Amino acid sequence: MSGAAMLRAATWLCRVLTGATFVVSGWAKCIDPPGFVYKIDEYLAAWGISAAIPPDIVIVFAVGLSLFEMVTGVLLATGCMRRAAPICGLLLMAVMLPLSIYIYVAEPVADCGCFGDFIILSNGATMWKNVVITLMLGWAQYGSKHIVPLYRPSTQWLAIAISAAYGLTLAFIGWNIQPMVDFRPYPVGTALNGEAVEEATPTFIYSKDGEEREFALDALPDSTWTFVSAVESEGDETALAIFDDDYEVTDEILSDLDGDVLLLAVNNPDIEYITRARLANEINDSITARGGRMIGLVAASGEALEQWTDLARPHFEVYSCGDTGLKQLVRGNASIVALRDGEIMWKRSLVSIDPAMLRDSAFVDDMPVIDNGSDARNLTLLWILLMIIFPTADRGIRRLFRKKPKSND
């Protein structure tokens, strides 16, 4: 293989690998824009500036960055915009690389959120990933003039338009209804029961010959060890924890989910929900008339929950629930989780529910919802098909209408 061929191969390899990484990263965040917003809020809270940034700005930034990352990845992987695409990638890494070094050293957040909930990387792995990507982008820029793009210059804008439309569709559905793919602990089909909550379990510290060791309850040492103290280990903070005033009632609630039950998860109990309180009550009245019931899980407690209840005037029982657990269960400020005998049938944001559906005698069964995974797969296949068809059609049309050289005869 000649030196020029090796240069082209190395350049294509760097472009494809970095492009695929950007596409997967941007895709995972477009799928779940609320999750990316939560992660940005974590950063802002760690820096003490969350109150200074309007929520609408955070949402626009989250979706815009996700789209830019995914489209940049597409351009890199297809060879389009030979010089501009690596520069766009390097501009991203000019921010992401220092940020990953910072979170590796200071650890303001548990993980960077680069791939949303799709892939969780440690802060150290994130930093080294970004170092490698930056180096490959530098090579891709160096060898850019030696490759031939998969798309003609006249159709490269189609790669941008089609990919942006695909990403915007994912983000629109993910924000207004629910993510098209659910990577969280409670996807459709999960059985909600007492086992869904990891309770705190005590461990015990014993000493022997100057050595201290920790033992679980079912592994206590023999009499040669001396008891020192008991330690209460922490449960899973992402699990559902439901409270009635100061009493945890998680097991009681989750073990009594026979028949059709709707969970109204209110992650953000502010004035925005109050405008939809009437719809929530209509949903409750509809499911109750059909022999089911509705339970409200609100991310508030104490006086805040009482004030919310006074304003919303719910027709259903309401309990306090941890904010993190609710966000793991369902996305959106206020959303419905439909259960049948404890198994999750569907999830949908409250704002996306058409009140006309409530008049259907089987609205729990017939509610049009996102089919977790398959809808995203079909949309992705359509995107890929369009990415193949348009440049192929462009070449065919140009060849069809190309002027034939005049004969000298």
Image: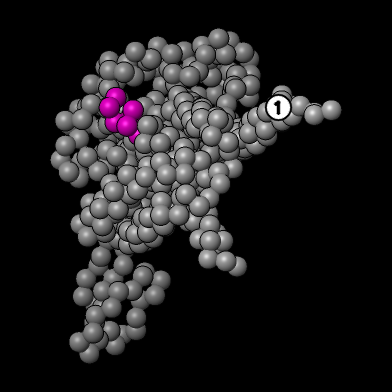
**Image position, residue 220 (x, y; %):** 35, 76
Q: Residue at x 36, y 69 (%)?
A: 217
Assign the magenta stretch its main secondary structure: helix
**Which contiguous range is marked in magenta?**
56-62
Q: Residue at x 63, y 15 (%)?
A: 361
- Quarter of the image where one finds residue 134: bottom left
Seen in the picture, residue 61 relative to 203 is either above or below; the reply is above
Seen in the picture, residue 76 relative to 392 is either above or below; the reply is below
- Quarter of the image where one finds residue 50: top left
Q: How many marks?
A: 1
Q: Nearer the viewer, residue 385 or 403?
A: 403
User: Can residue 392 be seen at all in this image of the molecule?
Assistant: yes
Q: Type of residue at label 1?
A: Arg
Seen in the picture, residue 232 relative to 192 is either above or below; the reply is below
**Image position, residue 287 (x, y; %):** 53, 19
Answer with left or right where residue 307 lies relative to residue 409: left
- Quarter of the image where one finds residue 207: bottom left
Residue receiving disc 1: 402
Q: Nearer the viewer, residue 308 or 254?
A: 308
Seen in the picture, residue 290 relative to 196 is either above or below; the reply is above
Answer with left or right where residue 26 lies relative to residue 99: right
The quadrant of the image that shows the C terminus is top right
Q: Residue at x 55, y 43 (%)?
A: 149
Q: Nearer the viewer, residue 404 or 323?
A: 404
**Image position, residue 154 (x, y; %):** 55, 30
**Image position, residue 310 (x, y; %):** 26, 17
Residue lying furthest right = 409
